[in-house]
Image (spheres, grey):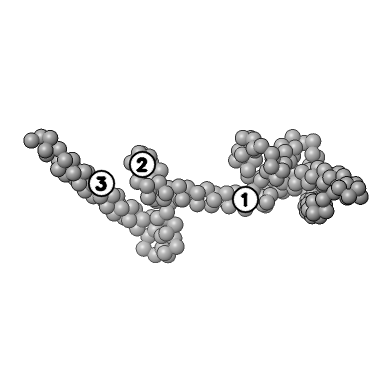
Amino acid sequence: ARRRNSGPQAALDECARAFRLGRAAEQARQADLAELDRRAGPDASDLVRSQIWTQLRLERLSVKPVSELTEGERAELQAGSKAELAETHATLDTAHSRDPAFMRLVHSSLACYHGVRRDRIKDELRHEAALLKLGKGNRQRSYALQSDLRQSEDVLSRAREAGKRYRDGLGKCTEEQVAVLAHCLAIRFDGQQQEPACESEEIQQYLRFIR
């Protein structure tokens, strides 16, 4: 008899579990709505209420055990965390853009990277020109190199112009911070193997200014 009843009992247990979870979820939702009203006050706009609700949900979900998160809650937490991180970055970037010491390092690393890149491209162009004279070169590659050269020269020009705003001008390429950033730029733009150090937030806060 016990074996015959095992199927119906399991279904009943699962139904009871789903009921308890649903009731708990509804209680939590009502508590969140009450907290939203408390934080927002009676005169908050829909936009402010939406922002507070997002923050409130992130707070709730971030302390909930991962094993208890539903698939929807995991997606909500991930999306909210990304949005929160983007907002933090935007705030930091605004502050950094007004910091002369910070921006001097950005422009210095750009000038160093593109100075090396420009010289390398010039060498490649000379080599390609020699091959073309022999009828062995690639004219399309030559055009692409010329475009790359113009790009580096434009960036160099803008960086040097920006350097005039700083009391000491641009930093030297031999300075440690400038050299590290220029190296990370080379990794990003030249298809080199990634290095964990260049992925750190300390470096990324500079690289976000460089597209």
Q: What residue is drawn where x is 80% and y is 40%?
A: 172
User: From what the image shows, is residue 5 above or below residue 52?
Assistant: above
Q: Position of residue 61 (x, y in %)?
A: 38, 45
- For the residues marked 2 and 3, what is the alpha-carbon distance in whole angstroms? 14 Å
Question: Is residue 64 shown to the viewer in this render?
Answer: yes
Q: What element carries label 3?
A: helix
Question: Callout 2: 10 Å neighbours few (<14), some, many (20+)?
Answer: few
Secondary structure at badge 1 equals: helix
What residue is at 28 percent from the left and 49 percent from the top? 25
Q: In this view, does 77 lie to the left or right of 102?
A: left
Alpha-carbon neighbours of circle 3 within 10 Å: few (<14), some, or many (≥20)? few
Provide the residue designation for mark 3: 21
Number of numbered callouts drawn: 3
User: In front: 63, or 185?
Assistant: 185
Q: Which of marks 1 and 2 is nearer the N terminus?
A: 2
Q: Say which of 181 and 168 sits in front.
A: 181
Query: Taking 16 as reference, is 45 left or right?
Result: right
Q: Mark 2 points at which residue?
A: 64
Q: Which amino acid does label 1 sit on?
A: Asp
**In front of the other: label 1 or label 2?**
2
Distance between the alpha carbons at the discs numbered 1 and 3: 43 Å
Q: Where is residue 101 in the image (x, y as percent from the top left)?
A: 72, 45
**Disc ID at residue 138:** none
Residue 164, how many percent across, how many down? 81, 51
Choose between 87 and 34: the one closer to the eye: 87
Relative placement, left or right, of 2 versus 99 is left
The answer to whether the residue labelled 1 contacts the one labelled 2, judged by CB atoms less than 8 Å apart, is: no
Does label 2 or label 3 sit earlier along the sequence?
Answer: 3
Residue type highlighted by circle 2: Lys
Q: Name the residue under label 1.
A: 93
Q: Reading the chain from its start, which is encountered first: label 1 or label 3?
A: 3
The residue located at (30%, 53%) in the rendering is 29
